Image: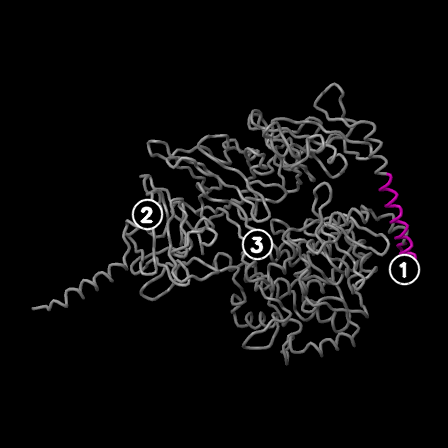
Amino acid sequence: MKFSNKVFPLLFAFTFILSIHEISNAIDTITTTQTLRDGKTIVSSDGTFELGFFSPGNSKNRYVGMWYKKITDMKVVWVANREVPLTNTSGVLLKVVEPGLLVLQNDSNGVVIWSSNTSRHVKSPVAKLLDSGNLVVKDTNDDDPEKFLWESFNYPTDTMFSGMKLGWSSKTDHEVYLSSWKSKDDPSTGEFTCHFDPTGYPQEVVKKGLMVIYKTGPWNGVRYSGSLTLRKDPMYKYGVVLNKNEAYYYFDVLYRSIVSTSTLMANGAAETIWVNPTNVWVTNSTTGADICDIYGFCGAYGSCNIANSPVCGCFDKFLPKDPDGWNRKNWSNGCIRRTPLNCLDGDVFLKYTGIKLPDTQYSRINESMTLEECKVVCLKNCTCMAYTNLDITRGGSGCLLWFKELINIKILPEAGQDIYIRMSSSELDKNINKLAVHSEGKRRKILITSLTSLMGVVLLGLSLMLYFWKRKKNVPKGRTGGSIIKDFELPLFDLPTISKATNNFSINNKLGQGGYGLVYKGTLEDGEDIAVKRLSETSMQGLDEFMNEVMCIAKLQHRNLVKLLGCCIQGEEKMLVYEYMPNKSLDFILFDQAKSRLLDWPKRFHIINDVARGLLYLHQDSRMRIIHRDLKASNILLDADMNPRISDFGLAKSFGGNEAEAKTGRVVGTHGYMSPEYVVDGLFSLKSDVFSFGVLVLEIVSGRKNWGFSHSDHRFNLLGHAWILYKEGRSLELVGTCSDDSEYFNEVLRSIHVGLLCVQKCPGDRPRMSTVVFMLENDGALPEAKQPGFFTEREVFPAESSTSTNAAISSCKMSITLPEGR
């Protein structure tokens, strides 16, 4: 066969074009014209890291991952498709596509197995494995880290190594955390996670599911209080960064010849390993090495010492809270002070040395205070339980204060720190220099302050007496206004204190607003964050609702109810002071497409269960039987760990033990959450709250609002849509993006079923909250759900019928709020 001279150049060009589709091992970059297949790898330019396909342990499944190239004992430090293993790599390739995504794709059918994400587009995207081990997607001509489209450092698996950060970005609301492998043969997400928790003051937290199993103790300027491995070393640099944009822990190796990693193991231990000159992995330390590392093992004020038998003990001046349990080696109830505190008589502080500092979830800091100033501040606040130096370098500086029971204490004789714990002044021993005693002058000052506060409370009491005297006819039979005042105990804040805390009610401190008025974030002088609800002159609610909220919640104590810290009544100003919830309200996250990613299914199910327990407490276990009447997503607040708190009791009603139902001519509540019998006839009962809870459950599962819900196939609300899917056996279609893991499908289906049981049209068909809690927490057959209330098709969508809706509201004497965020 003869070829013309023109054919050879064409063949050469064609061969070259084909060759660029398969990547060479000698490069560190994948472009849009290149692919990475099984058997090929890319390597960082300095030869440290390698990226390619691998099989873990004895598994035959294939994954895309990263490892140290020069170390013969292969350790995978990052996995891309950890949740979607490859059983056949034929035709599977890793490539970069426009507008800037790194995708693992089946070339034969185009199915994407795994993909990175991006919020920006570039014309010439590439994926590059940096010398740091960070796999990044970026514009080919832009090496600015701030402009990377995606980076593996933001999505680690189980391993942290030099150059990485563990923590939060407030700009993107994104958390970087570690999650364990299920086993050495299975890199999919295991039970354990490791987080940098900036709540109170930073510490690292290891969790098994939602349960905390280990906390490092706070950062003290040198290391975490309970971590003995983080010591000054010329080969390493590590620390904590806290500013308005970021909160994270980092560590760097200062010499490239040193390899060091920290891995969250499948058993929950955090193992630190490094490579010595013989290129063999060496275990440097293991977190959770002894029983004293178990979080809260010895209970509140209990101290754990692995060298003692038994390991749990009580500090001097403390006694076991449960002596019988203590003798049976059940230390969970911890210890209590031998002599109860008496703030008015003047407390003292006892110095304890050589300990791992307690959990700092409920702590406050001041970086500029001396230790003496720290003591004075703590002494003035009766809720302050202990203090110490914030930073132990250069002789100690700053102030760290604890405001709740001290828990997670471990004895570290040689490496522990000092802490000053509040004690009754009757425990004062003048012969022991360890006691920090305040002077008589300071006692008198405290006494004067206390008397002034007492006078304020008396004035508040007189105001309340006048208020209840005016409402005398409305006082329930057998209960007088005087007895209500006698039962009322609540701290009184003055207006200057609240004004200073909120920066004179600055718009920058505004958290939100509702029918009551505006809500502001504030910070008291002792550093405690608060939320302040300020009754506005144009508020739809007035003094009745203000006093109702005070009386309903002042004495309620439950971990799923927001805590009322006090109130302020001065002139025309009426304010309620609550504990501050850093994650705002549930609706703020749940109905936001980006933020809702923070709520995976375990968190959503946890919220559902905790709200159910809080409602059960109101209905059955509290000192008063309370109907909330305005349960909705915006009235569920979330703390730093996404634990829910039921809030806003302005519309709540309390009943006696035999009462269960009432009728009102003024219907109040929020569209989409009110039960049919309440809207139509003004009848409200415990089952009205159950209906609202059912709506909330379906909203949490779906991530969609009931009010304003629309669907292309019909004009039912969210309840109707859920009912249709339930009847057709397609309930899983209700689920948003919160769970695509079959492991949780039973919980999801059970939650939807329970939600539909709660929103049944007839109140008698709805379960009590005690039954709801049982059904959520236990497996077993559930009764068939009946048709929900308001199961009628709308002729027009809510947005199209605002005029007629408003007219209906005014004619029925209803006070109904739309479900807006607070």
Residue 628 in picture, x, y percent from top left: 74, 60
- Residue at (28, 50) in percent of width and height: 25
Instruction: Give how far across and how far down residue 623 sits, in percent.
Output: 78, 51
Residue 615 to residue 674: above or below: above
Q: Are there few (<14), some (14-19), or many (20+) residues within 10 Å of tag 1?
A: few
Look at mark 2 in the image and give the residue it sits on: 43
The residue singled out by tag 3 in the image is: 603
Percent of width and height locating residue 538:
79, 64
**Does the magenta-highlighted stretch encompass residue 294?**
no
* Residue 763 visible in the shown view: no
Q: Earlier in the sequence, mark 2 or mark 1?
A: 2
Q: Which residues are magenta?
A: 451-480
In the rendered view, tell whether residue 358 sits above or below residue 754: above
Q: Residue furthest left?
A: 1
For residue 371, which numbered disc appears in the image? none
Residue 472 is one of the magenta-drawn residues: yes
**View extreme (top): residue:** 431
Disc 3 marks a residue whose amino acid type is Lys
Residue at 63 percent across and 26 percent down: it is 353
Answer few, some or many: residues within 10 Å of disc 3's Cα (few below 14, many 20 plus, some between 14 and 19). Answer: some
Counting residues from the start of the chain, the first of labels 3 and 1 encountered is 1
Relative to residue 136, is residue 296 drawn left or right? right
Which quadrant of the rendered structure holds the C terminus?
Answer: bottom right
Badge 2 density bin: few <14, some 14–19, many ≥20, Cα 10 Å: many
Residue 471 marker: 1
Horizontal arrangement in the rendering, residue 191 relative to residue 706 (left or right): left
Question: SS at mark 3?
Answer: helix
Foreground tag (2 vs 1)? 2
